[in-house]
Amino acid sequence: MSRVADQAPSRVRTSEKAIRSALKAIQDAGLPVDKVCVSGGLIEIHCRSVAGDRPENKDSGLEEW
């Protein structure tokens, strides 16, 4: 979607229903939500992966004896 230079930018307001639907879909997918940021019309939903943090790699290149 491109914006023509002569047009004024439009304001978009996210509805509560849209936010709740997005959070419900994330919940149904089993993803944990770390935080939700709302700034004007911009909504950011930050999720953590299901697997969590990667395990520490203890491979130094040599076999342990």
Image (spheres, rainbow, N blue to C red):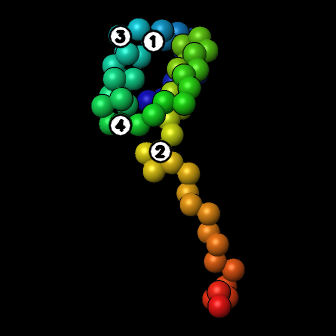
Q: Which residue matches tag 3?
A: 17
Disc 4/disc 1 C-alpha distance (Å): 24 Å
Q: Which residue matches tag 1?
A: 14
- Asked if the residue at tag 1 contacts the one at tag 4, i.e. Cβ–Cβ closer than 8 Å, the answer is no
Residue 21 screen position, x and y as percent: 33, 19
Q: Could one spot residue 9 in this view of the protein?
A: no
- What quarter of the picture does the N terminus occupy? top left
The residue depicted at 54 percent of the width and 30 percent of the height is 34
Disc 2/disc 4 C-alpha distance (Å): 9 Å
Q: Nearer the viewer, mark 4 or mark 1?
A: 4
Q: Which mark is residue 6?
A: none
Residue 25 screen position, x and y as percent: 32, 28
Residue neighbourhood size for the residue with mark 3, other residues' Cα within 10 Å, grouped as few (<14), some (14–19), many (≥20)? few
Q: Which residue matches tag 4?
A: 30
Q: Nearer the viewer, mark 3 or mark 2?
A: 2
Residue neighbourhood size for the residue with mark 2, other residues' Cα within 10 Å, grouped as few (<14), some (14–19), many (≥20)? few
Amino acid type at mark 2: Ser
Q: Quadrant of residue 23?
A: top left
Disc 3/disc 4 C-alpha distance (Å): 20 Å
Amino acid type at mark 1: Thr
Which of the marked residues, 3 or 4, is nearer the chain's N terminus? 3
Q: How many marks?
A: 4
The residue depicted at 56 percent of the width and 60 percent of the height is 55
Q: Label 3: state its secondary structure.
A: helix
Disc 3/disc 1 C-alpha distance (Å): 8 Å
